[in-house]
Image (tube, rainbow, N blue to C red):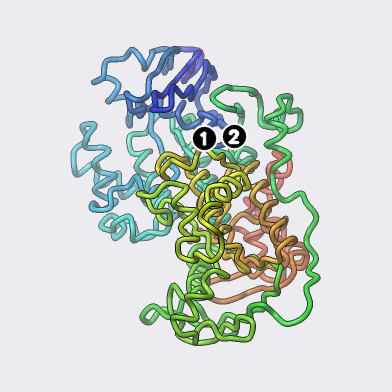
């Protein structure tokens, strides 16, 4: 028996591109023992996902190339293992769950078929595979597993799809589970449940978990040890508590300092007539009422945060306010004029004042356009804003504001990480210098330091230019730092509305208290106490979570 279940020794990975060689991973070493959880923490481009892809043999070669190192599983080097044996190891001894389950589940096959395939490929009989798939779906909390087996991925919520992927990964009882940003896009309550599920399954099976994340709260909640990566180099490692409390490397200190939720709460000061007055807005999809009479006011230069779980109506509200979908009742007065009654020509002129940053930049950015074309397209549509001679200079300024560089202008969206694509989407929205920006989970996929930078940018724009924001988010510490008011939505209703201080310090509703209790804290001591209270159901402010996702 080897000293460690997994041992990575002096691993280096590079990619050959038209712009030269990119050294993605540089001589890193770490180990992972049975029943242990190791977190790899770092920002986009740090090499954390590349190193885990090397373990699973998922690096495209070419253009990738492993130039040095060993990856030992129970003392046997995966890098020198024959291809057939390596394929048998993947799935049976090492499994992986990905950041975006919708992209990694086949849309044309039922989830039951896909879970069964993972087992039949490794020699299990079809009848036994179906029985095990049913058991696994029940174990990961999918309601009515018998019917769920015959559903397709798009018929599940984001949290349920992640549970399906966990079931698939556990089908062959692996010794090692690699989780690559498994909760980034999930609501706080769903995130808490998924992390608790992983911990429960680990205790049941004794598997080791390697979790890749940029979220310090996730590290504090689930990991035993953490290693920190920057630009392909492993810069620090140790127990979670030791690294958080006694960080030595400047990069680690920067990540910890950038964690949201530590700033002063905003106190609304705006007076006068509202910029946007929303009254009794309703939206139906057939017999289903997605918005049930939503009403609120937004002042110029204010931020209204909208929080709630998937299905609460947050994104539907955003689309209706922008007339991307037509409402079925109510009004939205923009400077005294009803947005819902505006003719197309008048609405077209108003579009420059109302912009939106969508949740998924992969879907909202045209893959055939370069970054320069994407950002400058606003001035093609509204040519009176900026002379063409100044477009390139202004695009460079906008990219710099959101943490990108001028050299990114010639690249296409697929050449960026998810966080970088979201920065492009924010730069695109800022190009028209709008009066209102609706951010639909606009910073959920960003690294903590970039997230802090973007929030600071948006806050500065609000102060300097009077831009108002409707800020849809599931990251409550970010809401605490950025918003003036908080609207809590549940199943199409507003269940609580007040200033940030009112909602965070004195929540009235059990639903709001559940959201606040499920939020993760980067301090491992605070998060440990919060997790124990949540599990025990002892704290009045942290009721037990319902397994509804």
Residue 306 appears anywhere in the view: no
Precedes in sequence: disc 1 or disc 2: 1
- Which quadrant would the N terminus be assigned to in this image? top left
**198 left or right of 334 in image:** left
Whole-number angstrom distance, CA of label 1 to CA of label 2 = 8 Å
Mark 1 vs mark 2: give the one in front: 1
Instruction: Say which residue label 1 marks.
Output: 211
Q: Residue at x 66, y 52 (%)?
A: 455
- Asked where in the image residue 175 lies, by quadrant, the reply is top left
- Asked where in the image residue 79 lies, by quadrant, the reply is top left
What is the x, y in percent for residue 266?
A: 78, 62
Rendered image: mark on residue 223: 2
What is the x, y in percent for residue 313?
A: 51, 71
**What is the number of callouts on the image?**
2
Rendered image: mark on residue 136: none
**81 left or right of 385 in image:** left
**Label 2 neighbourhood size at 10 Å, few (<14), some (14-19), many (20+)?**
many
Q: Is label 2 in a helix, a strand or a loop? A: loop
- Asked where in the image residue 514 lies, by quadrant, the reply is bottom right
Of 10 and 221, the residue lying toward us: 10
What is the x, y in percent for residue 431?
A: 56, 58
Q: Are marks 1 and 2 in contact (CB under 8 Å)?
A: yes
């Amino acid at each position: 028996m080897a000293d460690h279940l997994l041992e990575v020794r002096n691993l280096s990975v590079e990619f050959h591109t038209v712009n030269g060689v990119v050294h993605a991973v540089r001589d890193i070493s770490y180990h992972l023992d049975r029943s242990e959880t190791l977190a790899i923490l770092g920002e986009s481009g740090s090499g954390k996902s590349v190193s885990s892809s090397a373990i699973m043999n998922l690096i495209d070669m070419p253009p990738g190339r492993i130039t040095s190192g060993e990856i030992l599983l129970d003392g046997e080097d995966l890098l020198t293992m024959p291809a057939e044996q390596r394929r048998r190891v993947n799935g049976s001894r090492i499994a992986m769950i990905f950041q975006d389950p919708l992209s990694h589940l086949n849309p044309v096959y039922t989830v039951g078929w896909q879970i069964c395939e993972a087992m039949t490929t490794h020699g299990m009989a079809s009848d036994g595979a179906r029985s095990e798939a049913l058991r696994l779906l029940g174990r990961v909390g999918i309601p009515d597993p018998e019917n769920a087996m015959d559903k397709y991925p798009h018929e599940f919520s984001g949290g349920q799809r992640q549970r399906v992927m966990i079931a698939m990964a556990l089908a062959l009882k692996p010794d090692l589970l690699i989780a690559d940003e498994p909760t980034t896009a999930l609501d706080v309550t769903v995130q808490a449940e998924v992390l608790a599920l992983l911990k429960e399954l680990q205790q049941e099976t004794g598997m080791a978990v390697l979790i890749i994340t940029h979220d310090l709260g996730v590290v504090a909640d689930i990991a035993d040890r953490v290693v920190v990566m920057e630009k392909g180099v492993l810069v620090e490692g140790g127990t979670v508590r030791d690294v958080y409390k006694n960080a030595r490397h400047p990069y680690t200190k920067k990540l910890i300092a950038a964690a949201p939720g530590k700033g002063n709460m905003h106190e609304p000061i705006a007076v006068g007539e509202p910029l946007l007055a929303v009254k009794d807005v309703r939206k139906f999809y057939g017999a289903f009422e997605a918005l049930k009479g939503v009403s609120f006011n937004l002042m110029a230069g204010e931020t209204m945060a909208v929080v709630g779980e998937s299905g609460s109506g947050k994104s539907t509200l955003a689309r209706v306010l922008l007339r991307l979908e037509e409402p079925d009742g109510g009004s939205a007065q923009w400077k005294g004029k009803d947005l819902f009654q505006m003719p197309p020509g008048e609405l077209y002129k108003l579009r420059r004042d109302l912009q939106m940053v969508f949740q998924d930049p992969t879907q909202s950015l045209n893959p055939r356009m370069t970054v320069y074309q994407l950002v400058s397209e606003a001035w093609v549509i509204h040519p009176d804003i900026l002379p063409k001679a100044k477009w390139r200079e202004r695009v460079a300024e906008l990219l710099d504001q959101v943490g990108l560089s001028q050299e990114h202008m010639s690249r296409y969206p697929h050449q960026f990480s998810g966080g970088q694509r979201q920065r492009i989407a924010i730069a695109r929205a800022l190009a028209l210098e709008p009066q209102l920006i609706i951010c639909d989970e606009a910073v959920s996929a960003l690294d903590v330091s970039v997230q802090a930078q973007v929030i600071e940018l948006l806050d500065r724009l609000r102060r300097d230019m009077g831009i108002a924001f409707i800020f849809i988010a599931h990251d409550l510490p970010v809401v605490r730092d950025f918003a003036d008011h908080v609207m809590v939505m549940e199943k199409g209703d507003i269940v609580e509305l007040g200033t940030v201080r009112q909602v965070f310090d004195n929540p009235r509703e059990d639903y709001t208290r559940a959201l606040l209790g499920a939020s993760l804290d980067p301090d491992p001591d605070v998060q440990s106490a919060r997790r124990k209270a949540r599990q025990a159901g002892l704290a009045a402010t942290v009721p037990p979570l319902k397994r509804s996702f």
